[in-house]
Image (cartoon, coloured by chain):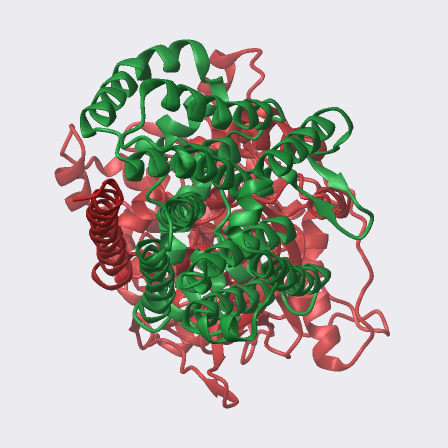
Chain colours: A green, B red
Amino acid sequence: MFERRLWFHIDWALLAALMALALIGLAQIYSATGGATSIYHTQIYGIVLGLIALVICLAFDYRSLGDKSHFIYVGVLLLLIYVLFFGAVRGGSRRWIDLGVFNLQPSEFAKATVALVLAKYFGESRRGAPTSGDLLIAGAITAVPLLIIMRQPDLGTAVTLLPILLAVAYVVGVPMRIFGILALVGVLAAPVAWKFVLKDYQKERISTFLDPEQDAKGAGYQQIQARITTGSGGLWGKGFMKGTQGQLRFLPVAHNDFVFSVLAEEHGFAGVLTALGLYLFVILRSLESARLAKDRLGAYLVLGVLASFTFQVIYNVTMAAGLAPVKGLTLPLMSYGGSSMIATLAGFGLILNVRMRRFTN
Amino acid sequence: MTAQAEDRRRIGSRLAALQIGAVVVFAALAISFWVLQIVQHQKYAEMAENNHQRTLALRAPRGVLFDRNGKVLVENRHSFTISIDRERTKNLDRTEQFLAQILGLDVAAVKQIVNRHRGEPTYRPIVIVDDASLAQVAAVSARKLDFELPDVRVEEVPTRKYPETMGAHLFGYVGEATDQQVSQTSGLKSGDIIGQSGIEKVYNADLKGEDGAKVVVVNSLGREIRTLDEQRPTEGKRLQLTLDYDVQRAIEDGFDAVGFNGAAVVLDPRDGGVLGFTSRPAYDPNAFAAGIDRATWSSLMTDEDRPLNNRAIQGRYSPGSTFKMAVALAALEEGVITPDFKVHCSGGASFYGHYFKCWRKGGHGAIDLRHAIEQSCDVYFYTIANMVGVDNINKWATLLGLGVKSGIDLPNEVQGLVPSTEWKRLHTKEKKWYAGETISVGIGQGAVAVTPVSMAVYMATLANGGTRVTPHLLKAVDEGDGWKSVPPPAPSSKIDIDSAKLQAIRDGLWMVVNAAGTGHNALIKGPDGKPIHDVSGKTGTAQVISNQGKTAAGNTKKDLRDNGWFVFFAPRDNPQIAGVVFLEHGVHGSNAALVAHHILDTFFAKLDGRPLPGKPEFKPNLVP
């Protein structure tokens, strides 16, 4: 199963970058929560379990995983449905399965699963270009978990499934005009969505984003504080555990959604460039793996996994700078969250898997 | 080309596009952070600082006031202010409602206070309650723990503590600087506490001290985490006053016992140092010290007795018979009469076709100057006033301190009036002085109007032999390195009075108290029952309305009773105390002498080392 020579094909550079980001995140969580708290320890467990998950995802040939993808998909859907009825409720939504020591969030694992199923579906297609039937099926594969997750409700996580579909569709050769039409529909649908779909608090978030000062003490508060936190960091930052915004709790959930703001405050533009560089390295390196992949299944798998990761990174970092509406989207690898850490590292296990087996038959 | 190769080419080009896209997006992110963290750093650094740093003003305690013997007169106590910090306010309306409710205040009143300060920067707290009760402090503190009122502050500040109404007009009061004061005085800002009256106002620069500041770090709940920087406030300079606490106490007790409004000023005739000073009715300056409430203020303002008016330096009254020594001195010094000059009093006399009555219907018979002063014979003074003329009376009265400002170190002193032909010409419609008017001036009626403080100077000048001393309150200043005495201000004028002539007047004054005069109420008796310390003085009973006017007024609610004066010095030789007691509608000058007696008795008991007299009880003569 795991041949000795494969060891030499593991992408150690990518793995090192992942670990570096996870450790930077851990340090900022330590700082933002004021020391070695239970949150900090949970994050360490998350990283350790994530590494185990990564090894597991690396150990099995991704092609045999692809062969079993429909089982995995159904399994995850069952978990999501289970959560919908029996999940632990926190903050008004059911997202978690209470495992006692740990709260498992199945929606985090839906991302890699959808990537795997879509890769398998398009990877096996013998035809040159996908048909509209293919696209409908791919859409359905994505839509089922997406709708279930929306019901939790967890719009943020649900939305991260869309980049997977788009990225895979893009790379399998869907003509650019289709994307153009989609974009047009999106623009036209926006007012309709504003009127009929979005809830009041969601509308408020968007209008607050456009003019945070109109509600500086309420919804705009976090956005303004995020900008102050980031901007006050300057070039070199205020120093580890010396950020006033994070330490004195002017910025809410600093260890979670706004962990990047805390990094920006305490380590300044230098720290920001370091972290952004590491993320960019991870993304480019993974795209490289997609290019090197032995088959289409591998390439699509890498891209699918990478798509939701990249989307979340870019959105969260933008939000951390106070330049995007505040949405409960965590920063993969750095934010606090066991399920997210495990699922993310498991996803990168798949990417490493594809690269490692680029020479095998 | 095989399908597979084509596949690879397509994937490769689309992947390349994604790579470029990723680099572009990350470059854009990096630029965004560069703008925020480098270009706009200063702005956000300041905002972060405003977020977590608070500068709290530490109010300097004002300088303590001591009496001439080192007894504390005015000091400071700790009080609590409750204020709203609008920077931390999420819902001002809610805070106002809630605060009013737990403090037991009217919501409208709270809103009014907030509105008055609306234009100020939000970091400056708005004080809602100045001198909060312990119950109010406890109510707010309990709510703060629950984070219900993150924007309400309780601060301990030094507040003035006055000896209640004692010397209220002398000490004055402090209050928040008015908008006008803030705009006119450099270095003064809204919310500063400054002296608004009395010594507090005149010596504000010495007393105010230097406010300090404390920079603290607060968290998002407004809780103070630690202190970054602290500048301790510097206490104001300590001032020693010329005042003698026991004399002051005696004045206040005397007025309490006699039950009239009025004023008293007691000086050391040798240098003009004020030993005691009062104006009645008084107010409690403590009410101002911690921010006076509207109701108290308006009741003080509308009170018909005008308690805020400092009668001792702002009231102008007809001096009546107490003016006779000025007329006597003018006649003696101008060589018109000698002390032995006699006038026959038959109970009245005619001048210029008018009949002027003496207060004693039967008359005094042939009477010389000494006895004319002792008996206060009106006819004698009509006669010599007529002989010396109004302009000479004006000249000598002025040299004795009447009709001019005394120059006391208190704000808003008014000037009295001793008429002259020039005054009549310049300031009246009639312009011409009629010789008949001089007759009334001879007994201190007519246009003559004096302030009590000028009467004190008048007596001090007679006591010390002609030096018109300047009354003053400041004796020494402690700038932190021990007491430095302040030299008394220069006298306003100094005249050489012929001692024989002056002695005749002094003899008359001694006889007023010690012989058959009207001032025996002021006589001090030693333990053996014999008079001691040779108190000399003069009563005066001055009409507030003419007899015809009194009849015309009929039944009026207005108090038309005569004003009572007693002016004094003691001992007769080398006097150490001089002063005036003025009773508004006090009916008789002899009633004023009752108060003067208690003052003098206390002063000399202290000097002699006798036990001080207790609180007096008087039975003033109320029969007109």
| Displayed quadrant of residue B424 | top left
The residue sitting at 64% across, 35% down in the picture is A71
Residue B365 location in percent, x, y?
53, 46
Q: How many numbered markers are drawn?
A: 0
The residue sitting at 57% across, 47% down in the picture is A65
Judge left or right: residue B529 versus residue B381: right
Residue B354 location in percent, x, y?
33, 28
Residue B232 location in percent, x, y?
51, 75
Judge left or right: residue A107 versus residue B615: left
Of residue B275 and residue B206, the one placed in the foreground of this image is B206
Establish if A176 lies above or below B403.
Answer: above
Residue B586 location in percent, x, y?
62, 38
Judge left or right: residue A21 versus residue B246: left
Residue B121 visible in image: yes
For this orientation, the residue located farthest to the right is B528
Residue B269 visible in image: no
| Displayed quadrant of residue B615 | bottom right
Establish if A97 lies above or below A287.
Answer: above
Quarter that holds the C terminus of chain B:
top right
